């Protein structure tokens, strides 16, 4: 059983290896959005809602297309839902997502004067905004340290044997205990990229993984 200090050192060692290994890989969609539009919490929020249950490769171009028509809650509520549906048609669950984008924008105007709130508690109080979205907005929209626990972060952290958790909520708490806040956002980004390219859900590419010697491969029954 490793001490907390040993776990911390191991997690930071993994981060350093993945920083090198992911250099030529496509960055998470939220990072691209920030590079393209600057730190704009509203655009990060909307692009995150569009990306739920969709691949970044599908949702990113759709987000960019939508932002040609509306970049603020005020502009978004002016768009008819059918128009939003047409713009975002190629991403999954487009009807639900168009409705949600309209409702979130309306709530932002009614409760927050059209400005995305900068606290986790306020963000999570918005209907349709869950922990992952709220943390993503805190991290990429406001530049605050936040762990964005999506399915990749949960899966890979457990496979590595860094933590032993059953739910993303447990993973959030366990990782916050191990990692200093300065690493939270970076760790989340790296795990997303690693999960999309190497440590995929079914049959990960262990044979070409630089973490192989330090990975416990918990639950991995088949790999390439
Ligand atoms: S060795 Fe395999 S299970 Fe471990 S992190 Fe790499 S790809 Fe994932």
Image: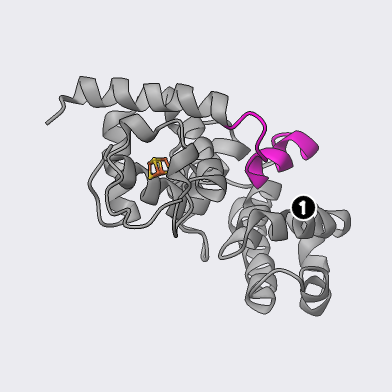
- 164 left or right of 112 in image: left
Residue carrying label 1 = 72
Q: Looking at the picture, does residue 12 appear above or below residue 26?
A: above
Quadrant occupied by the N terminus: top left
Magenta residue span: 22-39
Is residue 165 shown in magenta?
no
Which residue is more in the foreground, 22 or 149?
22
Which residue is more in the foreground, 146 or 213?
213
Which residue is more in the foreground, 53 or 108?
53
Q: Is mark 1 within 8 Å of ligand 1?
A: no
Q: Is residue 118 visible?
A: no
Residue at 34% across, 30% down? 213
- 48 left or right of 201 in image: right
Q: Looking at the picture, does residue 47 appear above or below residue 177?
A: below
Ligand 1 position by quadrant: top left
* Residue 23 position within the rendered picture, expressed as x and y whole percent measured from the top left: 63, 28
Which residue is situated farthest in the left direction here?
Answer: 1
Q: Looking at the picture, does residue 86 appear above or below residue 144?
A: below
Q: Is residue 160 visible?
A: yes
- So how many labels did they put on this image? 1
Residue at 37% across, 57% down? 222
Is residue 24 shown in magenta?
yes
Residue at 32% across, 40% down? 160
* Residue 186 position within the rendered picture, expressed as x and y whole percent measured from the top left: 51, 30
Q: Quadrant of residue 11?
A: top left
- 109 left or right of 69 in image: left
Judging from the image, what secondary structure is the residue with disc 1 in? loop
State the colouring used for the structure image.
Answer: one colour
Neighbour tally class for label 1: few under 14, some 14-19, many 20 plus, Cα within 10 Å: some
* Residue 182 position within the rendered picture, expressed as x and y whole percent measured from the top left: 44, 23
* Residue 28 position within the rendered picture, expressed as x and y whole percent measured from the top left: 62, 43
């Amino acid at each position: 059983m490793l001490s907390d200090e040993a776990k911390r050192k191991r997690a930071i060692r993994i981060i350093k290896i993945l920083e090198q290994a992911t250099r030529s890989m496509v960055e998470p969609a939220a990072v691209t959005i920030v590079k393209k539009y600057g730190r704009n919490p509203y655009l990060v929020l909307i692009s995150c809602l569009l990306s739920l249950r969709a691949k970044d490769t599908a949702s990113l171009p759709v987000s960019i297309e939508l932002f040609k028509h509306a970049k603020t809650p005020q502009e978004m509520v002016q768009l008819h839902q059918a128009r939003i549906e047409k713009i975002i048609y190629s991403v999954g669950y487009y009807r639900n997502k168009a409705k949600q984008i309209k409702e979130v924008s309306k709530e932002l105007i009614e409760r927050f004067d059209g400005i995305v709130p900068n606290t986790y508690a306020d963000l999570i109080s918005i209907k349709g905004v869950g922990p992952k979205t709220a943390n993503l907005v805190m991290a990429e929209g406001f530049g605050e340290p936040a762990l964005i626990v999506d399915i990749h972060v949960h899966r890979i952290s457990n496979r590595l044997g860094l933590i032993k958790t059953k739910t993303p909520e447990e993973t959030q708490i366990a990782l916050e205990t191990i990692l200093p806040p300065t690493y939270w956002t970076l760790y989340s980004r790296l795990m997303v990229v690693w999960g999309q390219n190497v440590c995929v859900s079914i049959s990960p590419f262990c044979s070409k993984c630089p973490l192989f010697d330090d990975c416990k491969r918990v639950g991995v029954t088949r790999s390439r």
